Image (spheres, grey):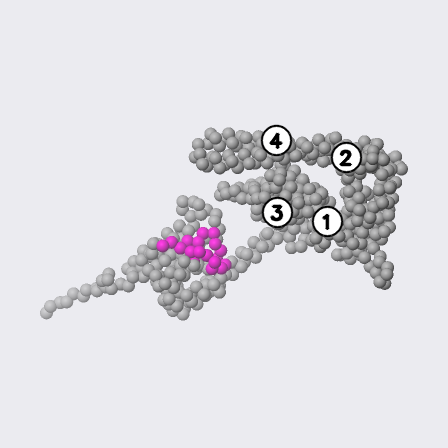
């Protein structure tokens, strides 16, 4: 009786269906991706090992890589995932392998859409670290539970991040982003520190805008000086910024509360940890000028009511502009007022000054200007104020001149270094040409500053010129039209601070305007 040996029957290699597997990897941030072995490599290595363990089932790892480095799992706007889905629809894949479910998606809705695409094309889905099978209902339930937790985890992380950023802003901390002109980032402590050379330019930009009262004109002057927006280097060594000024980026600069040492968040201002660059009164004046220009189209708009102090009168209590307003009880009589813009927006109880009759305060200012010529003490104070303004302007220009000299030295050293750098002739020529262009702009600006300094130093008012200017005010004033009177006031006066609670008025003169008036007065006297 013959005995038959039982033999195990193994299917031949040709009878095993080939399962074409694609590995998908993802990392939310770009941090560490430049390393030789990063998180994406680790995910792929684990997935490849799992596919190798399923070799007897016919699993084969496809060579194409589907790696999304630096992309969130909260949406499906990812280049590698889109390529993966295209290959799924084209029938080139049989299985998708990931390290964890949340690598594919952290959104339940997005994941459902991806799974619908996989099921429609007969493609299975496998997570290396979470065992389940999507071919039956229990596996799909397990998958949905896992994904629900993944979405919950993403939302909790997002909430915590928002709460942390909110708390940091309220404490006045700088939480990142592109640095602004005037500040550098102290990376170890993540805090803004003043860049002295840039801070000087920032202050000059504010003053120039208040002087010209036009974003476009200011931007053109800044570009003529060769000044640009903040130029900085990313962690990867890429150069950003350094663009010419235009109305948009200039407006963004002069409205940034960082410059007065504050952080703006959700409609509130918080005291920042960083030091201020610009005085708050200058920043507020700039803000008021921008608002006024946006309403009336700028300084050249017709002043139909003859408001002499429009644009130069400020409420001292609120540090806000006082705007011209009119009321009429009947069609024949019009009443003009200057109203504190802060009180206008926030209610009368918010400001002790509130409003003042326009004709009354205009007459007071005119009489004040006339009275200076008759009062020796007032004249001495006005002369001192005018000279002080000129000296401050000279100081600012000298500081800029010194900064430009340092800049020219740096560029000269940069050119010498490029010559000895060993770079190709083409590369060094391009960089040298860029530095020579900056040198040319810096030299032009230096010449402009020298001319301005010469004019300011030679144009310092003496007592005789100042007196002649004020004495000429009365006959000139009486012969002017309403529009010409407004222009004359704006020529002489830079700012008027009005304290309605104390009944005090402070006039800040424009020294150049007084000088112009004095020169005109002397010219008229010679002709007579």
For image coordinates 64% across by 48% down, the residue present is: 251
- Cα distance in 3D space between marks 4 and 1: 35 Å
- Secondary structure beneath label 1: loop
At label 1, counting other C-alpha atoms closer than 10 Å, the crowd grade (few under 14, some 14-19, many 20 or more) is some
Disc 3, disc 4: CB below 8 Å?
no
In the displayed image of the protein, which residue is found farthest to the right? 374
Q: Quadrant of the C terminus?
A: top right
At label 3, counting other C-alpha atoms closer than 10 Å, the crowd grade (few under 14, some 14-19, many 20 or more) is some
The mark nearer the N terminus, 3 or 4, is: 3
**In this image, 93 relative to 143: left or right?**
left
For image coordinates 57% across by 30% down, the residue present is: 409
Single out the mark in the foreground, 3 or 4: 3
The stretch in magenta equals 64-81
Above or below, comparing residue 260 to residue 12 in the picture: above
- Residue bearing the label numbered 2: 388
Q: Nearer the viewer, residue 357 or 354?
A: 357
**Numbered circle sitting on residue 405:** 4
The mark nearer the N terminus, 3 or 2, is: 3
Residue 267 position within the rendered picture, expressed as x and y whole percent measured from the top left: 67, 55
- Cα distance in 3D space between marks 1 and 2: 27 Å
The mark nearer the N terminus, 1 or 3, is: 3
Q: Is residue 124 in the magenta section?
A: no
The mark nearer the N terminus, 4 or 2, is: 2
């Amino acid at each position: 009786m013959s005995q038959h040996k039982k033999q195990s029957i193994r299917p031949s290699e040709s009878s095993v269906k080939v399962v074409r597997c694609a590995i998908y990897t993802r990392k939310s941030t770009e941090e560490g991706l430049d390393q030789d072995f990063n998180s994406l490599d680790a995910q792929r290595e684990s997935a490849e090992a799992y596919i190798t363990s399923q070799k007897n089932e016919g699993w084969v790892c496809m060579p194409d890589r589907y790696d999304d480095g630096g992309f969130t799992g909260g949406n499906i706007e990812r280049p590698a995932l889109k390529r993966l889905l295209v290959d799924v629809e084209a029938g080139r894949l049989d299985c998708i392998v990931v390290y964890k479910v949340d690598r594919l998606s952290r959104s339940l809705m997005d994941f459902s859409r991806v799974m619908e695409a996989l099921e429609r094309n007969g493609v299975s889905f496998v997570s290396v670290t979470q065992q389940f099978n999507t071919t039956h209902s229990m596996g799909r339930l397990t998958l949905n539970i896992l994904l629900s937790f993944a979405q919950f985890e993403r939302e909790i992380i997002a909430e915590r991040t928002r709460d942390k950023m909110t708390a940091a802003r309220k404490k006045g901390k700088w939480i990142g982003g592109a640095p602004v002109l005037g500040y550098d980032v102290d990376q170890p402590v993540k805090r803004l520190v003043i860049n002295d050379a840039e801070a000087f330019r920032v202050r000059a930009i504010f003053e120039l805008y208040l002087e010209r009262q036009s974003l476009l004109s200011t931007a053109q002057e800044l570009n003529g000086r060769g000044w640009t927006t903040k130029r900085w280097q990313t962690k990867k060594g890429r150069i950003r910024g350094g663009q010419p000024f235009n109305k948009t980026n200039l407006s963004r600069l002069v409205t940034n509360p960082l410059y007065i040492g504050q952080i703006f968040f959700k409609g509130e201002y918080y005291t920042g940890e960083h030091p201020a660059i610009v005085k708050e009164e200058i920043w507020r004046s700039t803000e008021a000028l921008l608002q006024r220009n946006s309403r009336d189209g700028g300084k050249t708009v017709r002043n139909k009511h003859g408001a002499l102090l429009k644009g130069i009168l400020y409420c001292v209590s609120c540090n806000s502009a006082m705007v011209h307003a009119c009321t009429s009880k009947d069609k024949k009589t019009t009443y003009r007022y200057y109203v504190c813009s802060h009180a206008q927006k926030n209610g009368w109880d918010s400001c002790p000054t509130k409003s003042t009759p326009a004709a009354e305060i205009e007459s007071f200012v005119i009489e004040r200007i006339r009275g200076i010529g008759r009062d020796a003490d007032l004249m001495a104070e006005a002369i001192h104020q005018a000279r002080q303004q000129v000296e401050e302007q000279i100081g600012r220009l000298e500081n800029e001149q010194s900064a430009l000299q340092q800049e020219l030295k740096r560029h000269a050293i940069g050119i010498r270094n490029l010559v000895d750098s060993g770079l190709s002739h083409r590369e060094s020529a391009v960089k040298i040409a860029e530095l020579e262009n900056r040198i040319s702009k810096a030299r032009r600006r230096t010449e402009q500053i020298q001319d301005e300094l010469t004019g300011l130093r030679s144009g310092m008012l003496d007592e005789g010129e100042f007196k002649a200017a004020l004495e000429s005010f009365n006959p000139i004033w009486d012969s002017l039209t309403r529009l010409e009177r407004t222009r004359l006031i704006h020529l002489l006066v830079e700012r008027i601070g009005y304290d309605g609670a104390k009944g005090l008025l402070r006039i800040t003169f424009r020294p150049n305007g007084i000088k112009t008036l004095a020169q005109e007065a002397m010219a008229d006297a010679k002709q007579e």
